[in-house]
Image: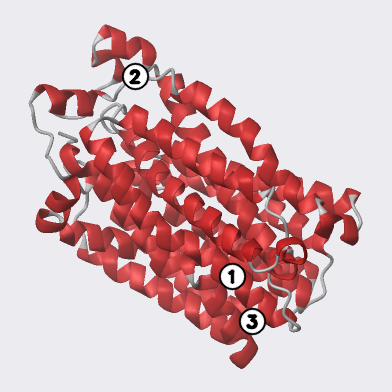
Amino acid sequence: MSTSPLSATPPDVAGKNSTSRVIFASFIGTAIEFYDFYVYATAAALVIGPVFFPHGSATAQALSAFVTFGIAFVARPIGSFLFGHFGDRIGRKSTLVASLLVMGLSTTLIGFVPGYDSIGSLAPILLCILRFGQGIGLGGEWGGAALLATENAPAGKRGWFGMFPQLGPSIGFLASNGLFFGLALSLSDEQFRSWGWRVPFIVSAVLVALGLYVRLKIAETPAFQAAIDRQERVRVPVATLLSQHWRPTILGALAMVVCYTLFYNATTFSLSYGVSTLHIPRPTFLGMLCVAVVFMALATPLSAWAADRFGRKPVLVVGILAAILSGFAMAPLLGSGSMPLVLLFLIIELFLMGVTFAPMGALLPELFPTNVRYTGAGVSYNLGGILGASVAPYIAQVLAAHGGLSWVGAYVSCAAAVSLLGVLCMRETRHTQLM
């Protein structure tokens, strides 16, 4: 059975899963989830090191903070296995609600963890546990949101519908970065380090309540309901995935590497480098990131439209080739210390992130059949996170310290080349029917 328009679904499902409700439910969840994740990324670049890892060296503090940043990416595939199992066995809706709760609770509690000065070594331990919880929740979020959009999409518009979860990160980043920007402007450095950085984590609780309200009002997707009716659910989705669909899982993970590397080197590493090495004021750099991420948001619908019109692979190949070339621009642009050139670098990297990220909302679900689609899409997405993001800021920090920004740029180009290999080896999925 092919993906059909929403109007072709049963009346009770069509009423609950109207186009506007599907779009909002798939978008709002990823926006909130990525808000939570980016709050930590920003805090890691600015304050986590001094608060939880009081080493004598600022570099050692930054490296320790980026290690905790990477913990969540290790947890994300575990979350995709866990939530993917229930998403493919029980359903998309209830699993999406559970993943949002886990992520939101972990993020909110980080805002209440005392620093090292208050409780000693217990502070970084608690931080790592909650950071792991963040990763578990996010590991189950994206796959379900992408399936909610694509399994409800009209024929020929899966790329466009799959774009809405991909817009969530831009909005989530703007919200988190904008809040940090406002705090940086209104608080002194002492106030910000003492308590101000905790505010964005605690605000997450309000956003999660909004996301839960929306998610609880949607119905199960037509494709999953049809699989239930045909009794096609498998007992252990991950076993079926690894035994029968390991190749698209690996290729999907490789394709995702460029997205993660572009984003986290343009934001987390560049923010840390810009503030600590280039001595750009924190509010100024945060403001530039807010401007640059708008270009990421603009690139997302353009790339999704092109992916529906020309295919997933052509759009990705063009975007990845541009990403390879962008690595050579890092040293002359970011390293210049000139505000216009630094902003240009951030815009280029985040625009290319939008170009390469948008087609993934449709591509990864299209690689797998319905009975393992939640697990497969989520595992591919999050394995790509381990390869492209978990250690990206850490590696970039080490490379910058030993070889300068040209080495970091080479790292970005190599990561993009890995994704190019994955995309060239996979099949075109634009005309695939979601059975």
Q: Is residue 430 above or below residue 319?
A: above
Quarter of the figure with residue 366:
top left
- The amino acid pointed to by label 3 is Ala
The residue identified by callout 1 is 66
Q: Is residue 48 above or below residue 16?
A: below
Residue 85 image offset from top left, x and y in percent = 25, 42
Marks 3, 1: nearer the viewer: 1
Identity of the residue drawn at 28% across and 66% down: 422
The residue identified by callout 2 is 219
Quarter of the figure with residue 426:
bottom left
The residue identified by callout 3 is 331
Q: Residues within 10 Å of mark 2 (few under 14, many from 20)?
A: many
Q: Is residue 87 above or below residue 136?
A: above
- The amino acid pointed to by label 1 is Phe
SS class, disc 2? loop
State how far apart marks 2 and 3 are (Cα): 49 Å
- The amino acid pointed to by label 2 is Ala
